Image (cartoon, rainbow, N blue to C red):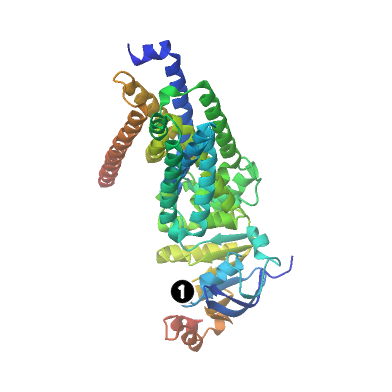
Amino acid sequence: MSFLDALLAHPFLQLALGGGVLASVGCGLIGPFVVVRRIGYLAGGIAHTALGGMGIAYYLGLEPLGGALAAALAAALIIGWVSLNWHEHEDMLIGALWAVGMAVGILFMSQTRGYSVDLMSYLFGNILLVTPADLYLMGGLIAVILGLIGLFYKQFVAVCFDEEFARLRGVPVTAFYLLLLCMVALTVVLLIQVVGLILVIALITLPAAVAGHWTRSLAGMMALATLLALFSTGGGLALAYAPDLPAGATIVLVSAAVYLVSTAGRRWVRRRVIARGAGGGSKA
Amino acid sequence: MSEPLIELKGVTAGYERSPVIEDVDLVMPRGEFLGLVGPNGGGKSTLLRVVLGLLAPWRGSVRLLGRNPRRSRRRVGYVPQYARFSRDFPISVREVVETGRLGRTRGMLGYRAEDRQAAERALSMVELDALAARPIGNLSGGQFQRALIARALACEPELLILDEPTANVDPRAETHLFELLRRLNGYMGIIVVSHDVAFVTRYVHRVACLNRTLVCHTAETLTAEVMENLYGHPINAVQHASEL
């Protein structure tokens, strides 16, 4: 049975694809900011700290994604504050928070029965277990992110492009920077079910970095990154289905392959442009 | 609207424990074209940061356009010495110039038609209209400098401050730049920070020499002796000062 036939036959695959689509939109919207502002490491810290919240929520019998949301938002604010005020120790402190978050998560999960299976799916995702409730949550998070970007696109661009100039123009730079990190936190939570929090960073940064190769504006980068993320999640899911591979892993590997192809392609295009420029010059 | 553009009284400021500028007094009237010169580490950038309200003075009072700098700096155009952003940022020249409208435009949603018009006017003032759609990273040094000036002009400032605008441009672009500033001076006060004293004195009304403390000279009275006192050794500005 091919992937497409299976998709029509099985509701769980449709839910999985729906989750993949929403996750892709999230990556496409936030990834470009993470790439141009070069905060991939901060985003990684936020993602891994989320496990602490999941573990605690799980232990208390609450919804783990809710715990992840709370922990990721708290981590975004703490990491943002550290990077603004203790810049010289940023590396060390984010690394520490990263590990402490995971340690807390693992500790609480170990005290809860049946933890091993769930831990793996939090770390590496299990897109085939997406439920309708997950889709509603993801849709809500996307709506929040989309709304904030729609309202404050020009401020986000200015803050990412030239922070000091934005401050001189009266933009509350600190608030927008923290807001941006909180949106990264929302995206992380969006992606946990799909690729898991270890692999989140790849899906946030790779499609956006590829889009950066070929676009000239942040908005264009968002649109292309969304399409590329759709391709990666769809392609990864299709590849994983027949041989029963972990979908999170295939999704990340597809997006990495796209990145390599794009990097090589861009070098090739540039060389051709330079060669053509030299040829045109000699004729003139 | 006759209050001075800048009014500094007894300003001392610095970082950590040692003051970088000390007991600086300066009154800059409207319409003035002021050159700010001095050796590296003499406090030029520190003075600008104080004037723009980015650094609080330890002592003394700072008025910018008659008010606290944090409130009035939106009406000031600032051209930084170093571009703090990466040149491969995916943004067009026009979009960069439009960011100069922040603080004058609405808080939410996109720029308005009047913002776009102001950005276009700024672009044509610096003769970059034809390159407006280019990515910012594709400009030459001189063009890039003019793009930053257009960004500062987009807010229709009453005062334009340029920090070492000629550091990365060739001499021809430098002349071009100062001719542009001379034209702009018809509409606004201008401060140019420069280490090229010879060049600056050709264009400005007054030269403020900063080496921890500030001394002002009209361009004509800037003598060899003054320059030597400022820099601690003879410099080639001397020739030029005597030409004037």
Residue A152: x %, y % from top left: 59, 42
Give, as a three-letter code, the residue at label 1: His
- What residue appears at the point 61 percent right and 50 percent down from the top-left corner? B102
Chain ID of residue with mark 1: B
Residue at position x 47%, y 59% in the image: A87
Say which quadrant the N terminus of chain A sits in.
Answer: top left
Q: How crowded is mark 1: few (under 14 residues within 10 Å), some or many (20 or more)?
A: some
Q: Is residue A47 above or below residue B87?
A: above
Q: Name the residue under label 1.
A: B195
The structure residue drawn at horizontal position 53% and vertical position 31%, both measured from the top left corner, is: A63
Q: Where is residue A56 in the image (x, y as percent from the top left)?
A: 50, 38
Q: Residue B204 sits in which quadrant?
A: bottom right
Closer to us: B169 or A256: A256
Q: Is residue A196 left or right of residue B191?
A: left
* On screen, residue B9 above or below B181: below
Residue A272 in percent (x, y) is at: 27, 40
